[in-house]
Each structure stands twice: as C-alpha cells, then as structure tokens.
Amino acid sequence: MSINYVSQQGYDDLNDKIAHLETVERKRITGQIADARDKGDLSENAEYDAAKEAQGLLEMKISKLKNMRASSRVIDPKDLDLSKVNIQTKVRLLNKKFNKEVIYYIVGESEANLREGKISVKSPIGEGLMGKKIGEIAEISVPAGVIQFEVLEVSLP
C-alpha cells in the first residue's frame, strides 16, 4: 500500500465523506431495501436487486475510502522546504512556449482537481516539477509533446 500524502483539509474532507456515506447514504439504501422487501416476492423484484447492488457498491466505496484514509499522512506546511517544488506547495511557472504564467498546487492523488489548479504529484507535470528550484527549467513530456516550464516561485498555498 502506497502512502497518500494529503493536506489537513484533504484529510478532513475524506473523513467527512466517509461519515456522510456511513450515516446518510447507508440509511437511504437500507430504506430502499426495506421498501422493496415489503413489496413481496424477492425472487423477481428488480427494485430489491437494484437496492442490494447499490448497497454493495456503497460498502465497496466506503471500504476504499477507509483504506485511503489508513494510508494517508498529513503534511504539515511548516515542515516543507520552499527552496524547491514539493508536495503541498504552490508553484508559479512560466510556460516557455506560450510565454504565459500558470499557477499549480502540487497535491496528493486524492486531492487533485484540475479546475482548482491542483495537480497530482503523480501526474506527468507534477512528477516533472518535483525537486525543481526557482529559475530551473522543467522539460515535461505530455501527450501533446514536451512542455518547458520555468519555476518562478515556490510558496505555501
């Protein structure tokens, strides 16, 4: 099992999601199963079968999230070395091809969200930036070719 590095917020969000699934969603599906059971013969009851399948999927999702939580390690921002790109850092970059600045937050896989500019440390860009210092150029292979990013700034989010 690999370690899943997360921020405190990411860890808290994971706990909240597990609690919601265990309390709200589990109760909802249990109600659906009871309603379907009340309708009689279970051998040909599609509602019952669907509810039981949903229950199985929910339990699998809860188990997966609990395993993720068990392998999670919260990173304390004050322990980070801001002289180079690291997990849980905000990175201001210059895309050399388009001469355009971009900002990414390097996060663990479970917190990645491209719309919010949060990229996984395991993504091609995340991996290519790790350990780079201010002023260094990272050449990163992506499906569209090779992108060159100059590291302009590393800071805390």
Image (cartoon, rainbow, N blue to C red):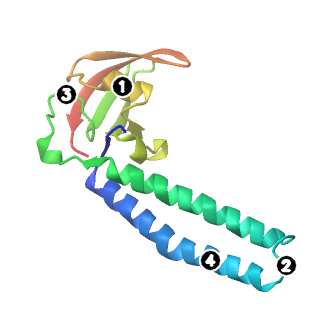
Q: Tag 1: residue type? A: Glu
Residue 84 is tagged as 3
**SS for callout 4:** helix
8 lies above or below 119: below
Name the residue nearer the viewer: 19 or 152.
Answer: 19
Front disc: 4 or 1: 4
Quadrant position of residue 132:
top left
Closer to the N terminus: mark 4 or mark 2? Answer: 4
Name the residue nearer the viewer: 60 or 12.
Answer: 60
Q: In whole angstroms, how far apart are the C-alphas of marks 1 and 3?
A: 13 Å
- The residue where tag 4 is placed is 30
Quadrant position of residue 48:
bottom right
28 lies above or below 137: below
**SS for callout 3:** loop
**SS for callout 2:** loop
Residue at 42% of width from left, 69% of height from top? 19
149 lies above or below 106: above
- Assess whether mark 3 and mark 4 are in contact (beta carbons under 8 angstroms): no
Q: Tag 3: residue type? A: Lys
Residue at 24% of width from left, 30% of height from top? 85
Closer to the N terminus: mark 2 or mark 1? Answer: 2
Closer to the N terminus: mark 4 or mark 3? Answer: 4
Q: In whole angstroms, how far apart are the C-alphas of marks 4 and 3?
A: 50 Å
- The residue where tag 2 is placed is 41
Closer to the N terminus: mark 1 or mark 3? Answer: 3
Front disc: 4 or 3: 4
| Label 3: how many Cα within 10 Å (few below 14, some 14–19, many 20+) | many
Q: Tag 2: residue type? A: Asp
Q: In whole angstroms, how far apart are the C-alphas of marks 2 and 1?
A: 55 Å
